[in-house]
Amino acid sequence: MKVAIGSDHAAYRLKLVIKELLANLGHEVEDLGAFTDAVPANDYHLTGAAVAEQVREGKVDRGIVMCGSGIGISIAANKVPGVDCALCNDLFTARKSREHNDARVLALGARVVGEEVAKEIVKIFMQTEFEGGRHIARNANIRMIEQKYSK
């Protein structure tokens, strides 16, 4: 799979760990920054949107975004219509974000989860398929809500 990845300065070091993991798992990685942990390296909201846009446009299959808490960058990514970004701090939410919600962007908080847990979250997110079934109609309803407020 092709994966876009991005972070702010707070998550720069975790981004490097995840980038290496993805490459070792055979994924092609597109790094959209930050390229340093210096403050301010970049603005998390711009990176979150850039990764989500790559997913929306079909240039990549999945995206992974990271900031200190994961909250700000996930909010920014979720502002891109048609993209669902899931903030996951544990293995259960990582699995369900894919099985039930077909989320294509994962958000991580570098100050919330440790490296080893983050690596396991990423593995699950990348390996888990969407279940379909009853979740198709639910996800379609989410798209309808999005369209209603996008006018």
Image (tube, helix red, strand yellow):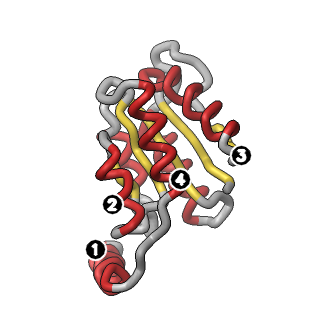
Residue ID for mark 4? 126
Residue type pointed to by label 3: Gly
Q: Position of residue 135 (x, y in %)?
A: 33, 79
Q: CA distance from mark 4 to mark 1?
A: 30 Å
Q: Identify which residue, 55 or 17, lies in the foreground.
A: 17
Mark carried by residue 140: none
Q: Is label 2 or label 1 in front?
A: 2
Any part of residue 148 in sight = no
Q: Position of residue 63 (x, y in %)?
A: 54, 51
Comes first in the chain, label 4 or label 2: 2
Q: As drawn, is 98 to the left or to the right of 7?
A: left
Q: Identify which residue, 4 or 76, lies in the foreground.
A: 4
Q: Residue at x 41, y 75 (%)?
A: 131
Q: CA distance from mark 4 to mark 3?
A: 11 Å
Q: Residue at x 56, y 26 (%)?
A: 17
The quarter of the displayed image where residue 100 is located: bottom left
Residue ID for mark 3? 26
Residue ID for mark 2? 96
Residue ID for mark 1? 149
